[in-house]
Structures are given as structure tokens and as C-alpha cells.
């Protein structure tokens, strides 16, 4: 969390948490989005899948889900 967002894990937004979860299987491979400052199509799809699962599992509300979908990462280029 500190490496990618400069925050303690408990301070992460739902979208930031989904990004970290997306990295877990292979941080070196999946961190290409962070290095390029732009989400890859794979990262976009996987983050969306994780957010949907978070909503379905009632980890986040529908409102938080909608907000997370609109959020951009601080390091993400326009």
C-alpha cells in the first residue's frame, strides 16, 4: 500500500484495495500498470471483477462500488 499509494493499508479506498488484490498472484508481472502510470486492459478488467465481488460479498455498498468505478489512481495519467 505504501509503495503504490503512499498509505497505510487501512487507509486504502475500495479501488486501491482492489488494485493491491489484483497484484497478489504476481506483483512483478501485474505491476506494469503502476510502472507505466496507466492501467492495462487486464488490470482494468480484474479490478472491476474484484469490486463486483466486494459488492456481492457486502464488503462495500452499491454506492461505494459506484464511487470506486469512477475513481482514478493518484499515479494514473489522464
Image (tube, grey):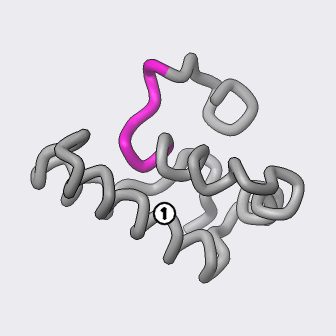
**Residue 51 lies in what quarter of the image?**
bottom left
Residue 62 occupies quadrant? bottom left
The location of residue 61, given as percent across then percent down, is: 13, 46
In this picture, is 62 found above or below 69? above
Which residue is pictured at 60% across the width and 44% down the height? 20
Residue at (45%, 56%) from the top-left corner? Answer: 72
Magenta-colored stretch includes residue 56? no
Q: Is residue 37 left or right of residue 70?
A: right
Examine the residues drawn in magenta and state their main secondary structure: helix
Q: Residues within 10 Å of mark 1 (few under 14, many from 20)?
A: many
Q: Residue at x 69, y 52 (%)?
A: 23
Pinpoint residue 53: horizontal percent, then vertical percent: 32, 58
Q: Nearer the viewer, residue 25 or 14?
A: 25
Label 1 belongs to which residue?
47
Q: Is residue 1 left or right of residue 54?
A: right
Check the picture and name the quadrant holding the C terminus. bottom right
Highlighted magenta segment, given as a residue range? 10-16
Residue 1 position in % (x across, y down): 63, 30
Q: Is residue 39 above or below residue 16?
A: below
Is 15 part of what is drawn in magenta? Answer: yes
**Residue 70 visible in this rendered orientation of the protein:** no
| Res 60 quadrant in image | top left
Q: Residue at x 64, y 25 (%)?
A: 6
Amino acid at each position: 500500500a505504501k509503495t503504490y499509494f503512499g498509505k497505510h493499508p487501512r487507509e486504502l479506498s475500495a479501488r486501491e484495495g482492489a488494485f493491491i488484490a489484483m497484484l497478489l498472484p504476481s506483483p512483478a508481472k501485474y505491476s506494469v500498470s503502476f510502472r507505466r502510470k496507466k492501467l492495462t486492459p487486464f488490470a482494468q478488467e480484474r479490478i472491476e471483477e474484484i469490486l463486483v465481488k466486494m459488492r456481492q460479498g457486502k464488503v462495500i455498498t452499491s454506492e461505494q462500488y459506484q464511487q470506486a468505478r469512477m475513481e482514478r489512481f493518484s499515479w494514473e495519467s489522464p
